[in-house]
Amino acid sequence: MSGIIDELLQRIADFHRSRPVVPEYPMVAPVLEALDEARSPALVEARHLPVLRHLDAVRLSGDEAVDAVLEEFLSLAPALPWIQTAGYRGVLSQEFHDNYGYVQLIGPKSIVEHRSVRVGIAVWGPNLHYPSHHHEAEELYHVLAGQPSFSSEGVCRITKPGDAVHHEPWQPHQQDFGATPTVLLYCWAGAVVADATLT
Ligand SMILES: [Fe+2]
């Protein structure tokens, strides 16, 4: 029997292999290794969050590689364990918590256990602001849906589906999400055990 997220992990690996930007980032090599080796359980215990109500408004991008990941994720979403960063509870607003969440596919205490790589998909509702935060792990985001703005070190960039955004370890970054729901694919490599913290 195949695992519940095996197809999604394969599509994420294929996605990374299809992107021209990926060879610029050596961190993708251990991520691809983790994706290729991962075997997920047949079933996981679903856990829902309020952010799931935004998924009906997520639109496919027209980019075949992006949509292959997005379609599989959207079809699995109700069956997956949605989580939030524990350290943000009581720190970020209730509005923020009512409008964001993610599924960690690979990583510490995730669907597939891993101690040096994280791979997941995160969703934010319209017009939220994610204040400046950082983490020891190196990070590569790909936008799957929405038009989030990423700001770091005085540079602001508005992105669209298919765009990649890279952060070095401890590089502070903040996001402003657009008028439609944002879906981001994230990969962390290196020191992935500690969560992000606000700066
Ligand atoms: Fe980050």
Image: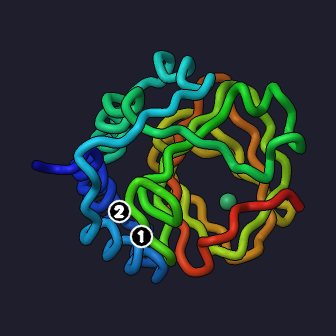
- Pick the front one: 46 or 59: 46
Q: How many marks?
A: 2
Find numbered disc 2 in the image and state the secondary structure of the residue it sits on: helix
Neighbour tally class for label 2: few under 14, some 14-19, many 20 plus, Cα within 10 Å: some
Q: Which amino acid is tagged 2? A: His
Where does label 1 land, which residue? 22
Residue labelled 2 has its Cβ within 8 Å of some atom of ligand 1: no
Estimate the x, y position of residue 18 in percent, counting from the top left: 29, 61
Q: In the rendered view, does 1 fall on the left or right side of 173? A: left
The residue located at (41%, 70%) in the rendering is 22
The residue located at (46%, 42%) in the rendering is 144
Q: Distance between the residues labelled 1 and 2?
A: 6 Å
The residue located at (70%, 35%) in the rendering is 177
Disc sitting over residue 161 in the figure: none
Residue 11 vs 94, above or below: the answer is below
Disc sitting over residue 16 in the figure: 2
Find numbered disc 1 in the image and state the secondary structure of the residue it sits on: helix
Name the quadrant where ligand 1 sits: bottom right
Q: How did the renderer colour the structure?
A: rainbow
Estimate the x, y position of residue 138 in percent, counting from the top left: 61, 74
The reply to whether dot 1 and dot 2 touch (C-beta < 8 Å) is: yes
Disc on the earlier residue, 1 or 2: 2
Estimate the x, y position of residue 151 in percent, counting from the top left: 78, 54
> Is residue 138 visible from the viewing direction of this image?
no
Residue 60 vs 148, above or below: the answer is above
Q: Which amino acid is tagged 1? A: Val
The residue located at (43%, 74%) in the rendering is 28
Estimate the x, y position of residue 110 in percent, counting from the top left: 47, 57
Q: In the rendered view, does 132 fall on the left or right side of 102? A: right
Residue 15 vs 74, above or below: the answer is below
> Is residue 190 visible from the viewing direction of this image?
yes
